[in-house]
Structure formats: C-alpha cells, structure tokens
Image (cartoon, rainbow, N blue to C red):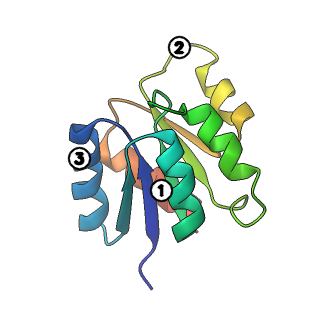
Amino acid sequence: MMKRILVIEDQEDNRQIMRDLLTSAGYEMIEAVDGAQGVALAAEHKPDLILMDIQLPVVDGYEATRRIKAQPALAAIPIIAVTSYALSGDDQKAFAAGCDGYVTKPFSPRQLLAKVREHLK
C-alpha cells in the first residue's frame, strides 16, 4: 500500500517541489496551506508521516505539532519539521513541540527523502 504523507506548507512553490519529489518516489501526498487545516487533515486522513513547516498562517507549526501529538489517534505519526528556521536552538524548539525530525530549507531532495524513509521504516 502506498504511504501517505501530509505536507503542511503555506508556500505553493515549496509544495510543488515536495509534490514532485514525493510523488516521483512513490508516495501519496496530501496538502495543507496553514496549521489549522493541517491539524484537521491529519485527523481526517491519518497519514503515515507529516512534513511540517514552522512559519505558517493561522496556527504555526509548533502549535499544530502540539495539537496533532495531543490526539491519541495521531500521536504516533512521525512529524518532520521542514523549515527555514536554522538558528541555534531552533531544532530544539521543534523537538520540544513534538517533532521527530528536523530538516532546514533549502533542503537537498536526497536529504529530505532519506529523512522521510528513515521515519517510515
């Protein structure tokens, strides 16, 4: 069965890059453009993995991650932060919010796919 990945990203160009990358690697992709929509789609589709931007409208990625992880039916879904926040300590903030992985933008497609595969084992 095809693995389903929820991408929560507000920038269309970034979603397009991830769409091309993930679909060509054989994954099904669901897209959300803000944190609140991401939380709702996570509950509706129960994806195998979530790629979470941190700078999001409505609800930021930290809060969206906390809301997803607070739901027992969703708590085990791995969440990888994919963010331009690359200052010292930003990765720790993402992990403290409940993220299981951290990738900085701009990312190498190979690096992102390796991180996705690592968390889908």
Residue 32 percent across, percent down from the top left: 40, 50
Circle 1 crowding by C-alpha within 10 Å: few under 14, some 14–19, many from 20: many
- For mark 1, what is the residue? 116
Instruction: Tell me the mark number nearer the camera, choosing from 3 and 1.
Output: 3
Q: Residue at x 68, y 62 (%)?
A: 74
Query: How far is the residue under mark 2 from the one under mark 3?
Result: 23 Å
Which quadrant does the N terminus fall into? Answer: bottom left
Which quadrant does the C terminus fall into? Answer: bottom right
Q: Which of marks 2 and 1 is nearer the N terminus?
A: 2
Q: Which of marks 3 and 1 is nearer the N terminus?
A: 3
Secondary element at image label 3:
helix
- For mark 3, what is the residue? 17
Q: In which quarter of the image is residue 119?
A: bottom right
**Residue lying at the far bottom of the rendered structure:** 1
- For mark 2, what is the residue? 87
Q: Which amino acid does label 2 sit on?
A: Leu
